[in-house]
Amino acid sequence: MTTATEITDTTVREVTEWLFTEAELLDGGKYREWLDLVAEDLSYVVPLRVTREREAETDIVEGMTLMDDDWDSMEMRVLRLETEYAWAEDPPSRSRHFVTNIRVAAGGSADELTVKSNLLLYRTRGDVATFDILSGERHDVLRRVASGYRLAKRVVVLDQTTVMTHNLALIM
Amino acid sequence: MLRDELRQILEKGLRDVEADWTVPAGIINDPEMHDAERERVFGRSWVFLAHDSEIPERGDYVVRYISEDQFIVCRDEDGEIRGHLNSCRHRGMQVCRAEMGNASHFRCPYHGWTYNNKGSLVGVPAGREAYGNKLDKSLWQLKPVPKLDTYKGLIFGCLDPEAQSLEDYLGDMKFYLDIVLDRSDAGLEVIGAPQRWVVDANWKLGADNFIGDAYHTMMTHRSMVELGLAPPDPKFALYGEHVHTENGHGLGIIGPPPGIPLPEFLGMPENIVEQLQRRLSPEQVEVFRPVAFIHGTVFPNLSIGNFLMSKDHVSPPTSFLTLRLWHPLGPDKMEIMSFFLVEKEAPDWYKEESYQAYVRTFGISGAFEQDDAENWRSITRVLGAQYAKTMELNYQMGRGLYEPDPDWPGPGKAFPMDYAEANQRNFMEYWMQLMVTDPVPHTGNGKVSDGTAAEALARAEA
Ligand code: FES
Ligand SMILES: [Fe+2]
């Protein structure tokens, strides 16, 4: 055991603060700033799930996803939102990321942490009196850099198979 | 029975679509229209259920819908494709509650009646004590889809036992479908499973958009034009063909603008291009050679997108193929099922690039798809209101501007540019015709298919 993989209270507090800051940026539409918190080798995946019998090994589908981004495609999303024509989010959704049940563990290398958290994402648009809710578990890899942490990997496992919102235009 | 008021709206709509090239807004979001549509459109049309690659092994199944009816689409123990109503003959319980899997039998969780994947009732708990061994199991098999058939890997079902054959129903559209479905020796496969999501929008808006609406690209997808993922030439859809056939089907086929060096045949990998030149007719090859975008709809609710697109703003384009089902859940709600398919024999690099291009542009999170859903839900909401329903919608694009193209090598009625709305009018006209035509009542007693595609084929040949 090296000391680098020890999870101290300070580490948990830093990670929690990082996740809350991230949520604030996303809910505030500060995507460019959010991109600064992302590593250049980012992998950002929302797997596709199906309803299967209990005996099935997994309900996560192989080969297909709901979202599968790297740094370039994430930058494309942000550049898109910076045009005047990203209608899906213009006017923007009002969103709220509720991030709970944060669990921090040692990562695959000394400078990485694996972080699990629960996510409840509330979304509402226009003057429509209804709202959409997405619930899921995030599996993150955070990398420690000189200035703090960078998101290197995120897998968001949603709790719905048929997704009850009209698109995944928001970053989860 | 169609209420007089609805009949009047539809009959006026039929006259208007011919004379004025307009369509009544009231057909989009109205509960009574939706009820009538369930019976008159979805009760009579061939509806896409699954692709045969989704159930490659014996016992494989998926659960799919025609309107509200749900069917287990499976490959039985003999390798035959079947479709059974997912409802127990005892009290109607779902006998299959997973979305996909592999099973030789379906056991009802209510009282335990058990069916094999041919649909036969093979087990009744306490049969001797409860029924004195007198229950004739052969009378109580799972109800089959009244008609089931396949075309080049696509499995369709139809609730009307008197309907014309799938071959006849697809008609001239087959020429174009083959270009997509039949261009390689080993055929296509669905990768993974379809993405499924719910949009507060009427299903017809998806069908209408894919059948002929190249016009919206410059505005709806302007953000992607700015990022270089869609053609910057505002006239790009002029370099295409706008084609429709009988039974409401139609598609648009767009090539590169002059001077833009895009690869032939959607830039498909060499081995597939070699195969397609051998498999397709010279006319089909001629149609396909310059293609960069194919968009189309098989009436009523199956659409095709075969596009050459980049996976992000810095990568070169790759083509991908998506099928999408606009499954109605109500007048103002649909579930989109979006399938990604790729040639089984395509090289791995192409499969990977093609998947990435699809998922980032036209899947649920796709940068193009997102903006379409935004429009369709907005339209649906507006057109659900009393005054808005009395409006006529303008379907006049191209009116008086051009004649059908005499040089087009394919069948159907073709116009020499894709900025047209002939396909959309043809779709709406066919839809309104079905709506005003009273269905022949089915007694439910006549001999229907035993639920296999082979049986349906044999019947069609007889
Ligand atoms: S409802 Fe299926 S066995 Fe009774
Ligand atoms: Fe679109």
Image: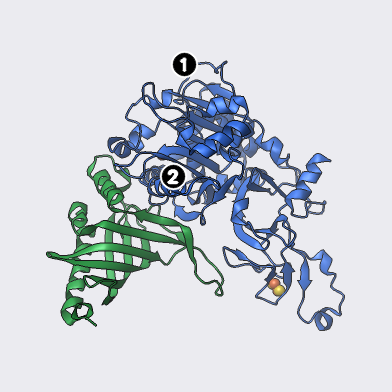
Residue drawn where x is 31% and y is 35% of the image:
B225
Name the colour assigned to chain B in the rendering: blue
The foreground one among B154 and B309 is: B309
Numbered label attached to residue A62: none
Give the quadrant of ligand 1: bottom right
Q: Is residue B115 visible?
A: yes
- Tell me what hue chain A is rendered in: green
| Chain where mark 2 sits | B
Specify the subunit that label 1 lies on.
B
Mark 2: is the Cβ under 8 angstroms from ligand 2? no
Q: Nearer the viewer, residue A33 or B377?
A: A33
Q: Position of residue B369 (x, y in %)?
A: 40, 45
Location of mark 1 (residue): B401
Q: Assign the C terminus of chain B to one quadrant of the image.
A: top right
**Other-residue count near label 2 (Cα within 10 Å), few / some / many at <14 / 14–19 / ≥20:** many
Q: Quadrant of residue B436?
A: top right
Q: Are marks 1 and 2 in contact (CB under 8 Å)?
A: no
- Which quadrant of the figure has residue A66? bottom left
Measured from the top left, where is residue B237 in percent x and y? 42, 27
Discs 1 and 2 carry the same chain letter:
yes
Mark 1 against mark 2, which lies toward the viewer? 1
Residue pointed to by mark 2: B380
The relative height of residue A13 versus residue B285 in the rendered view (above or below) is below
* Residue occupying the point 27% across, 70% down: A99
